[in-house]
Image (cartoon, rainbow, N blue to C red):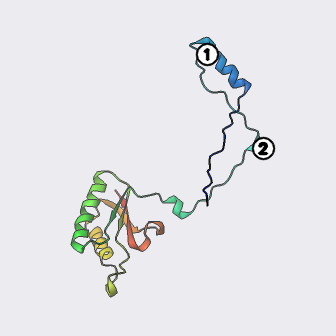
Amino acid sequence: MGKKSSLPSRLIFEESEQNDALMEKIFAGGDYVPDKEPALEIPPSETSLKKTRTSPTDAVSRPDAELDLHGKTREESIMMVQNFVMTCHANQFRTALIITGKGHHSGNQGPVLKREVQLWLERNGKQYLKDFHTAPGRFGGSGAIWLNIK
């Protein structure tokens, strides 16, 4: 099955008398440069105003930085989080995301990394963070922590 091309088979250029006259004036005068392009008038019947939908997820933009802790040990994670938070603060980032994972491989203990990272943030993050909370669903939900940097 062949793939259809989205390009037109040939291009059509429309010319208007107004554009032709402007170009002739530019080339004939040699040093004439118009201040701006002539305004196009669009009849009201050809315009449409569409109300854009907004949802809570639209209000949250991508974080300025992300740290993924998948596959890291508890000790590695804490060292990485400490460095990450301090770096985000030093670079004046507004938001950051720490991906801890949901702890599916932690057994009955639940998500070990998330618990440890949250404890570190509560104890040591006050001078760097406004606050932190579970990330919005599209950024990992319960498997990630959203940081608002001071």
Left or right: 113 as drawn, with respect to 27? left
Residue 47, visible in the rendered structure? yes
Closer to the observer: label 1 or label 2?
Answer: 1
Quadrant in the picture for residue 118: bottom left
**Which residue position is annotated with label 1?**
27
Asked whether residue 127 is in view, the answer is: no
* Type of amino acid at the residue the image marks with label 2: Ser
Q: Residue at x 32, y 71 (%)?
A: 70
* Label 1 vs 2, first from the N-terminus: 1
Q: Residue furthest right?
A: 45
Give the image location of residue 124, x and y in percent.
25, 66
**What quarter of the picture does the C terminus occupy?**
bottom left
Point 66% across, 54% down: residue: 51
- Residue 149: x percent and y percent? 35, 58
Picture quadrant of residue 22:
top right
How far separated are the C-alphas under marks 1 and 2?
36 Å
Asked if residue 7 is positioned above or below residue 27 in the image, the reply reads below
**Residue at x-position 31% and y-position 68%:** 69
Q: Amino acid at mark 1?
A: Phe
> Label 2: which residue?
45
Residue furthest bottom as drawn: 108
The picture places residue 55, in percent across and down from the top left corner, at 57, 63
